[in-house]
Image (cartoon, rainbow, N blue to C red):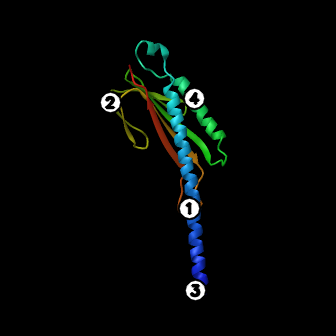
Amino acid sequence: MKVFIVFLALLMVNIGFITFQDDHTVYENMQYSIRRVAEDCAYGCSMYFDSEAYSEGFLIYDTEEAVRYIESVLQKRLENDSRDAIKELHYTAYFFNEDGTCRIIRDGNDDGVIGVEYPYILSDDQGYEETVNEPMVKVVVTAETEDIFRQDFLYSRQIIRSSSYGNKPY
């Protein structure tokens, strides 16, 4: 009888480990996917700039086109979610221009313009600090998910990833 009880205990522990490993793999893949989305958004946004200001020697990002690009990338990611694990995707975009301004856009709404002097230390909502030395775009993507982990004591309902790309002024 002792052997049977010990066998059942080890079986339950191993099932718990296998479940955790499977859930953690899904969690890692979602983090990787959201990170790729953030990188795509930041890189794409850094390509949209005001050509008239650029011809005058200033790198100023075209935020309207960039916001359309971000929203199209996020929409495609939601459409390709085969497991329906992601409920919502939110973003915050920081556009650091060469004229010393930073335009902040959250989910398509203009959150204001702040004056910056390079080098500037950007502290985002999660407390992550980044030194900005030149014009650049930083995009923070937040994914609201269902609880990925099947075990009661583990939970994660939010995945946050960010990426930034800059263009050197000439």
Which numbered marker is on residue 2? 3
Residue under circle 2?
119
Mark whose residue sits in front, 3 or 2: 3
Mark 1: secondary structure: helix
- How many numbered dots are placed on residues in this image? 4
Mark 2: secondary structure: loop
Which numbered marker is on residue 69? 4
Q: Earlier in the sequence, mark 4 or mark 1?
A: 1
Identified at 43% across, 41% down, the residue is 125
Crowdedness of circle 2 by 10 Å Cα count: few (<14), some, many (20+)?
A: few
Q: Earlier in the sequence, mark 2 or mark 4?
A: 4
> Do the numbered discs 4 and 3 sit on residues whose CB atoms are within 8 Å?
no
Q: Is residue 142 above or below residue 41?
A: below
- Cα–Cα span, label 4 and label 3: 63 Å
Name the one closer to the observer, 91 or 163. 163
Residue under circle 1?
20
Identified at 45% across, 31% down, the residue is 165
Mark whose residue sits in front, 4 or 3: 3
Mark 4: secondary structure: helix
Crowdedness of circle 3 by 10 Å Cα count: few (<14), some, many (20+)?
A: few
- Cα–Cα span, label 4 and label 1: 36 Å
What x and y, as percent, mark residue 43? 50, 31
Q: Earlier in the sequence, mark 1 or mark 2?
A: 1
Q: Is residue 128 above or below residue 13?
A: above
Left or right: residue 18 compared with residue 92 = right
